[in-house]
Amino acid sequence: MIALVLALILIFGIRACLGARKAQAFEDYVADVGALVGESDQQGDALFGLFEDPGTQSSVDVENTINGFRVESEQLIERAGAIDVPDELSEAQGYLLQSLSFRSDGLSGISEHLPTALGDTDPAAAEELIAGQMQNFLTSDVIYSQRVLPAIQTGARDADLLERVSDLPESQFLPDVSWLQLPTVENAIGSIKGEAPSTGGDDPDEKVAPGLHGTGLQGVTVQPAGEKLSDGGVITVDGTEGLSFEVEVQNQGENDERNVAIRITIDGGDAPIELSGEVPSIKVDETVSVELPLTEPPPTNEDLTVDVTVEGVPGEENEDNNSAEYLVRFGS
């Protein structure tokens, strides 16, 4: 009888010891994950902080710093692959490595394309490629929040250790989804170059990229009538409701431009009708159309003057082809 009791005590003791060891293994794993993603998040904070405010760092300094982030991200993956992983958390570990790999891929892509983006040879294409790398960061964040953390919770629940991993580390590398948009990246690259963001204004003190800057008005069409305006006489447009002016703008310079303002004034009635629009971004040699809806019914059966102007961009010296005046008669 004594032998049986001793055997039971020994068995329960071994089980308790094994249970404690497993619980400690879970806690250690969560702590290791927290340390790894904490360092990764610090890389993200430093990267986007550098993009937003490079301070006095030169372009070469920024390139070297981001290349350093790339190397550190690769080392993080190696460290993540070497940590002890409880069997129940093997799925979470696979997702963790995926998440860190997407971050490393993004940093590698930025490091590869940044010198071209900061140079004078086809920087626009490199800026697009850098903007594309931001998707890697978003994907990594989604994998971590939607795969890594739930997999840890599932593994802990299966092992009856959910209470031991209740405080799971959060992680976010991409600070804002606006970084997925090309204009945000363009502004960041411009700040590293020492350029002010293009606003479409005509401030002579605003810093602009070297080279020719210029846009041109290519044509105006009244929609949905499809009446293309010309300066050869009065254009008659049927109807007054649901109309809009489709304005074609061409970038005729050597630089991509952003926030190009468009103004339309319809005069000849009791009071002018003012319309405005904007081209968010336009590449070199690109022609884009912007639709400006007619906000109020115009006077009918009268010859009206329609002035259309594409505002000059920073650095534009010749605006001769930026505006046109048309005569339009709207039918009732």
Image (cartoon, rainbow, N blue to C red):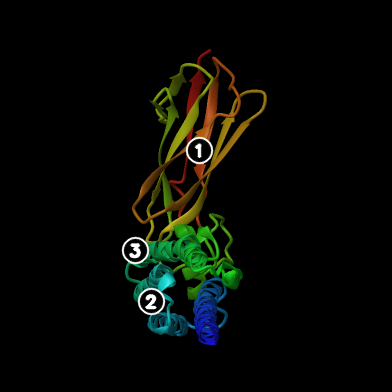
SS at circle 3: helix
Nearest to viewer (mark 2 / mark 3) = 2
SS at circle 2: helix
How far is disc 2 from disc 1 in space, using C-alphas? 43 Å
User: In the rendered image, which residue does mark 2 sit on?
Assistant: 111
Q: Earlier in the sequence, mark 2 or mark 3?
A: 2
Disc 1 marks which amino acid? Val
Q: Which mark is residue 308?
A: 1
Nearest to viewer (mark 2 / mark 1) = 2
Residue shown at 53% from the left, 74% from the top: 41
Disc 2 marks which amino acid? Ser
Q: Which mark is residue 125?
A: 3
Q: Position of residue 8 (x, y in %)?
A: 52, 81
Tell me whether circle 2 and circle 1 mark residues in contact (CB < 8 Å): no
Please indicate whether residue 115 sits to the left or right of residue 319 in the image. left
Residue shown at 46% from the left, 85% from the top: 61
Question: Closest to the observer: 24 or 122?
Answer: 24
SS at circle 1: strand
